[in-house]
Image (spheres, coloured by chain):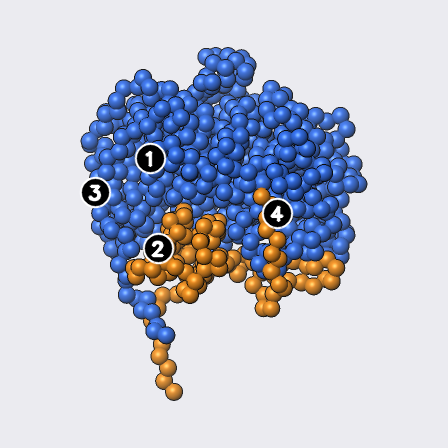
Amino acid sequence: MEEKAYMVPNPMTPGQVIIIDPNLCNGCNTCVEVCRSDVLVPNPEKGKPPIVLYPDECWFGGCCVGHCPVPGAIRMEHPLNQRVGWKRKETGEYFRIGMKNPPPPNTRPPVG
Amino acid sequence: MAEPNYMQAVDWPYPVHYGKENEVGADVLVLGGGIAGCHAAINAARRGAKVAVVDKGAVIRSGLGGTGVDHWHLACTNPCSKITPEEMMGLVKGFGDYFYLEYGNGITCYITCKESYDALLDCEKMGVKVRDVDDEFVGAEFRDEKTKLMFAYDYENKFCIRVNGGADIKVALYNELKRLGVKIYDRVMATSLLTEGGKQGARVVGATGLNVRTGEFYIFKGKATVLSTGAPAGLWIFSTELAGAALFQEPNLTGEGTAMAWQAGADLTPMERSSSMLASGGLSYPMYGTGNAHNTWYACTIVDANGKEIPWIDRDGKVLKTVSERYRPAPGQKTFFYGRMAPSYEIWGPSLIPDLPERIMKGEFVLPLYADLPSMPKHERRAIWGLMIGHEGKTRIPIYDKYSKAGFDPDKDMLQVNVMPPDQYVFTAWWGSFGPRQWRTGGFCNGGGLVFDWDLKTSLEGLYVAGQSTYPGADHSVAACSGRYAGRKVAQYAQTAAEPVIERKQIDVEKARIYAPLKRRDGMGWKELRAGLCRIMQDYCGEYKNEETLEMGLRWLNSIRESEASTAYARNPHELARTLECLTHITVGEIVMHASLARKASNSALEFNRLDYPEKDPPEWNKLVTIRVENGDIKVGELSLNYWLLPPYAPTYEENYRKHSGL
């Protein structure tokens, strides 16, 4: 069977630093305006999610996530070579950022 | 789903006007809108100056301190502090930073001791939470019940304040700038300083800038200028695959300030300092993002793979039995700073056993290690994970939110320490220790910078410094305090300074320089160029140097400037800015190599190793070596290590501060 394939440049690394949910994003571009390095640029189509143009320049400060007015519309992902793990003291269970079937989120807010 | 056609270029999302000139006039020009630049602008504006702030990013979040601060150093004048500024100056003999470093600067250190608490109160007035007003920590050892201030490290002497609203401090500064009517030029990268008559060494009268989105050109005219750009970072390692998340220095800090001050003829020192620094390892993890016991994590209990606790000891090696003791000076000791990193025994603090590497090697402790938060007292655990991790730079979203959403619970979970060769466990900022180091990663309390006086004025008329542009750089509170002080001084200077006159030829030369990469299509892209320049720094100006390697390094840099860098292309304003950063990289590399050639002696405080001058610290070289350029010639000078207390200055800090502080 013949499949379709394309000549494309290699994926950038890291490549998935920011993930935008197109169903939640309202295209306000607040993230674009707070990003210090122009990792994101506005979508040429107004109201659409910004484009993550330079993921390889991300500092992972998270400003885009912190300023987003729509909870959950944008999330930051640590590159795979930056993900860490932890052990539950009582049970010895081991977890890590990015694992399949993670434990339920801890909803306690930070101080302040 | 339609497959995107990656090979087809999409139009740049912003209108592009390469070379279009925008002229901006101000009394005070602030280059770099980070913590120092914001405080400088705010304080100049409050004194009636018309102020313009120029920033490569967006002032609302830009700069190394833009993502937060959790503890505020040297707040010696807060009502609970048991250490006066004068006592502090007696303790921090290196002045560079109050916990690591020699060959620092007593001026910015003293200014911080005097004004750190005031700067914090100022931020509080802008809306930043700095106290436990919600009474979450009532009864905690580190909380003062009357003022509700909370302290870190030394719970007896109380001069370092925990800031429980620091994550959004930059937003508060930004709002204050807006309120005061300061003009903000976001996304404008300053590219050169303008001098009177276009002459090197003359009064600074402005700067040029490039808008990194539109490609437009800016001519800033200012009676006085504050240089508050970040120090050069990333000169030795460039790898987006390894560094991004772990990088302490932010990628925008490429040294434009240093390079433009050099080209304008300013004196710099000690640019040869080649220390590795906190979070400088090329294989680092996210800052504060693995288990450890340093900085925001001080003084977390650490256990090995079998749950066996790593002992904490005091400066004399006595094992500390309680968590509380880790936050107290040793018997008879005035105060302490972090662990044993401080230069003298006098201020060594409690630390994990310094022979941990050997004991791991012998099998006494089994890797991996863990930060045992669940075993910590409730308030200490919440202070580390919740207050400190939550408000420190790059922790709110990347660590607190991210890890919480992934299910991490500090009441139950022990965060793993990254696994490294045992010798790496000697320093406790474990997230950042591992891998090839960023030699002189710059800035944060360890780089070189501009020479300055008690007015924070540089060797050039009209040019003042704050934050990382000072040597040896600055942390958050030093940046804030030097910014306040510089802001007062420039406002005063601008009141009587002559109107700036710009030399048109200087503009034309700069425009020709910065737009050249747009005309090329088949040369090298900026990333390959950047990585190649890092290679030159690693090879010829690395941990060990000699005359031959440094001369060879200069030869390579110059050759690259003539060849690969002269063919580097840019296809949009963003790439243009990144390409210009590579040219900056060459200039800063040359400065570092010239400075390294000028110091003909090895020096332990500067982590400076000359293979051709192997004797460490010969007394005749215990001085600052200054360098500047004049008509293409390198001019080397020297300064005493305490030049700020020698003529023409007064012999005491207090007297100099009284004469110069503008208060």
Residue that numbered label 2 is attached to: A41
Residue that numbered label 1 is attached to: B183
Coordinates of residue B476 in the picture (x, y in percent): 51, 35
Q: Which one is in front in this view, the residue at disc 1 or the one at disc 3?
A: 1
Residue that numbered label 3 is attached to: B20
Coordinates of residue B520 in the picture (x, y in percent): 24, 52
Q: Position of B556 compared to B483: left or right?
A: left
User: Mark 4, residues whose alpha carbon is within 10 Å: few (<14), some, or many (≥20)?
Assistant: many
Q: Chain of mark 3?
A: B
Frontmost residue, B184 versus B294: B184
Task: Say if labels 2 and 4 share a chain.
Answer: no
Frontmost residue, B324 versus B362: B324
The Cα atoms of the two marked residues, 1 and 2, are separated by 24 Å
| The colour assigned to chain A within the rendered structure | orange
The Cα atoms of the two marked residues, 3 and 2, are separated by 22 Å
Give the chain letter for blue. Answer: B
- Secondary structure at badge 1 equals strand
Coordinates of residue B240 in the picture (x, y in percent): 45, 54
Q: Chain of mark 2?
A: A
Which quarter of the figure is the N terminus of chain A placed in?
bottom left
Task: Say if labels 3 and 2 share a chain.
Answer: no
Coordinates of residue B121 in the picture (x, y in percent): 53, 30
Of mark 1 and mark 3, the one earlier in the sequence is: 3
Q: Which one is in front in this view, the residue at disc 3 or the one at disc 4?
A: 4
Who's the residue at 61% across and 47% down the image? B386
